[in-house]
Image (spheres, rainbow, N blue to C red):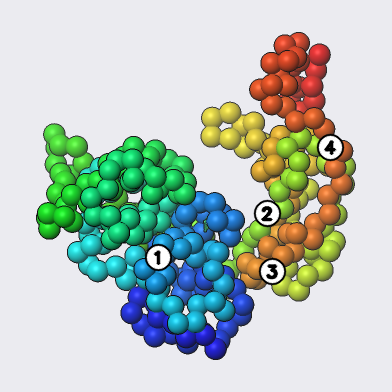
Amino acid sequence: MVRFTLNGKNIEYDGEEISLLRWLRYTLRIASVKDGCSGQGACGACLIEIDGKAKLACRQKMADMEGKNMVTIEGFPKELKETLGRAFVASGAVQCGFCSPGMLTRTKNLLTNNPNPTRQEAAQAVKPHLCRCTGYVKIVDAILLAAEKLRDGKSVEYDTHEIGKSAPKFQAYERAVGEPLFADGMYFDDQYLGALHLSEHPRARILKIDTSKAEAVEGVVKVLTYKDVPGKRRIGMITKDWDAYIAEGEITRYVGDVIACVIADKMLTARHAATLIDVEYEVLEPLTDMTLAEHSDIRIHESGNLLK
Ligand code: FES
Ligand code: FES
């Protein structure tokens, strides 16, 4: 039994040995704590406060939480939460909002220890965070604006949706504080969950895909490969040049290429089974800018083969 507090509530935990992120997201369904890199500690999206320090929830184990005091954005004091969220909205620092709760938690932590940070200190503070869409200039602007308003005890104002005025992004405040659900945060009764098996090599010919071990795992409903896609497998917003699955005989183009997808009743089951898929590769030389610069006579056939 592990005892701790979360957002002011006393909790007794006697469950599976899982990460704190997994428990917050998938048991409590706290939307603001995002899973951006599934435990690699690389994105900052899962940042929460533990005993007053900013910590990555994906790197904490439930067993180590004894006696801890945890706070997510849902537990921030109301005025502080509003000032931070509104500063991000007013500065245009929220686009999709996936990184924003982690950024807000980082901002809270920074301003608690340093209420008047320099621009450089604010930039340094968000270095461990990945934002794929806003860019960091506006995020640093937002941190400095929040700091100023908190020091002055004033609220952050911004134009509302009026003709002739610049308007905040749709649902920007809700995104900033982590309320909207992304696909991974949506739950339905009796839903299945999927996990991908990705290419191990940036450039390799797939010789054989063996899904039998994954299919034998209890709870696995189906393992999808290229064979399950009727018609053309190429997808893309503008040009359809991205293979939805790589087939046997085809060549991968990066380590994110999908070889198979395991569908199971539980996420951990799907993820475990995805690791059991055996793929035989013929590893090839990756194509890099340097490869191409060194060989100006190389062209790439759509099969991924090099042509001279
Ligand atoms: S999910 Fe924790 S750092 Fe990315
Ligand atoms: S990742 Fe989309 S706003 Fe940062």
* Apparent side of residue 229 relative to residue 10 in the rendered image (left or right): right
- CA–CA distance in space, label 2 to label 1: 34 Å
**Cβ–Cβ under 8 Å for marks 2 and 3:** no
Residue that carries the numbered disc 1 in the rendered image: 53
Quarter containing the N terminus: bottom right
Q: What's the residue type where badge 3 is placed?
A: Thr
Foreground: 217 or 87? Answer: 87
Q: Which residue is mark 2?
A: 196
Q: Nearer the viewer, mark 2 or mark 1?
A: 1
Picture coordinates of residue 146, whole percent (x, y): 23, 51
Q: Earlier in the sequence, mark 3 or mark 1?
A: 1
Q: Position of residue 20 (x, y in %)?
A: 52, 71
Q: Earlier in the sequence, mark 2 or mark 1?
A: 1
> Label 4: how many residues lie within 10 Å, few (<14), some (14-19) or many (20+)?
some
Residue at image coords 58%, 28%: 239
- Assess disc 1: are there few (<14), some (14-19) or many (≥20) residues with their C-alpha within 10 Å of its C-alpha: some
106 versus 265 height, above or below: above
Asked whether disc 1 touches disc 4, contact meaning CB atoms under 8 Å apart, the reply is no
Q: Give me the disc on residue 283.
A: 4
Amino acid type at circle 1 is Lys
* Among the two numbered marks 4 and 3 on one chain, the one whose residue lies closer to the N terminus: 3
Picture coordinates of residue 136 (x, y %)? Answer: 38, 40
- Give the labeled residue for mark 3: 269
Residue furthest toward the top? 297
- Packing grade of label 2 (10 A; few <14, some 14-19, many >=20) is many
Instruction: Specify few, some or many for label 3: CA neighbours under 10 Å numbering under 14, 14-19, or 20 or more.
Output: many
The residue under label 4 is which amino acid type? Val
